[in-house]
Structure formats: structure tokens, C-alpha cells
Amino acid sequence: ATRRQVSSLFAPLLAFAAAPPAYASDWPEFDAIREELKGAGTGGLAFMQQKIAAKDYGELREFTKQWDLDFRKAVLGKARKAMPKGPDRDRAVLVANAVTFDLIGINKAIRNIGNEDDAEARRWFDTLVDDIRDFVSLEPRGPRPPPEG
């Protein structure tokens, strides 16, 4: 990979890492998602980014399937369930579903061994990062309401 390809691949995460430091929010479920965008958390975004940049697709084929469970279902699902009922929570379902389709897109782009589509894998990865940022934007504002009885 050329230096420009690698730097363009890392741009989405680096741009987010330059954001001001996060504060402890009333919604810690969303803190876990922000950590993921910074390359921490489960480390899944950083791992996928490195594998795509290196055109090292072996482990990535299985990883995209597993990360759908480990991150999308567990982390995004927990954040969505913590949200008060309403249009943002409904939208969170759609965005979480989009994350699944992004992971499927990465997987399809690299599925054919020896005939992987690097540009398509990068495009789906960038879309994945955008969708996860979109999910974070749905974080409720203000104090957490008491649990619904």
C-alpha cells in the first residue's frame, strides 16, 4: 500500500482522535462506542483498519462476522436499550442494522481469495465508521431519567 492509501485509510479514525477529550457522561454505554472510534474499546475498528491497509484479509473474513456480535449486538445494543423510548431510539435500531450491512460489505469485498476488492473494502470501512459516528450522535442529552418501572 502506498503512503497516501494508508494515510487516507487512517484519516477517519485520526480525525476523531483529534476531537476534544470525552467527559464522563450520564450515558456510559455511549462512552464505549466513543472509545471504539478512538481505536480502543474492543479494538475492532483499529484491527480492521490495519488489516485492510496491509491487504491482509485472512483473519478479517471471520472477524467481520464475529465483531457483528461482539460490538454491534453487544455494545450498540446495550446503548440502544439504555435510550429512552422515542424517535432517536427507533433510529438507533436502523443505524445498528446499517453497521451489520457495512460489515457484510467488507466481508463481500474480500471474500474471493486472490480477487479481493481493496477499494470496496475501504469504502465499506469508511461507511462503517460514519455509521458508528451517526449512532454516537443519537446519545441522549442531559441527565439520565430514572429507570422505567
Image (tube, grey):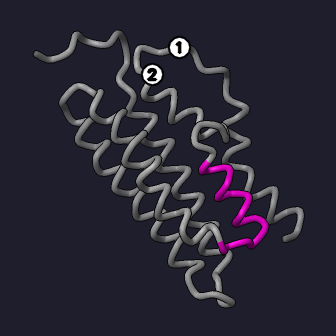
Mark 2: secondary structure: helix
Residue contact at pointers 1 and 2, CB within 8 angstroms: yes
Residue at image point 36% right, 49% down: 95
Q: Is residue 60 left or right of residue 7?
A: left
Residue 34 point in image, percent of width and height: 55, 33
**6 lies above or below 31:** below
Camera-nearest residue between 111 and 118: 111
Three-letter amino acid code at the position of disc 2? Pro
Three-letter amino acid code at the position of disc 1? Ala
Q: Is residue 86 left or right of residue 76?
A: left
Residue 114 point in image, percent of width and height: 69, 90
**119 lies above or below 88:** below
**120 lies above or below 45:** below
Q: Is residue 108 left or right of residue 45?
A: left
Mark 1: secondary structure: loop
What are the residue bounds of the magenta stretch? Answer: 44-58
What numbered label is drawn on residue 28?
Answer: 2
Q: Residues within 10 Å of mark 1 (few under 14, many from 20)?
A: few
Provide the residue designation for mark 1: 24
Camera-nearest residue between 141 and 32: 32
Residue at image point 18% right, 29% down: 85
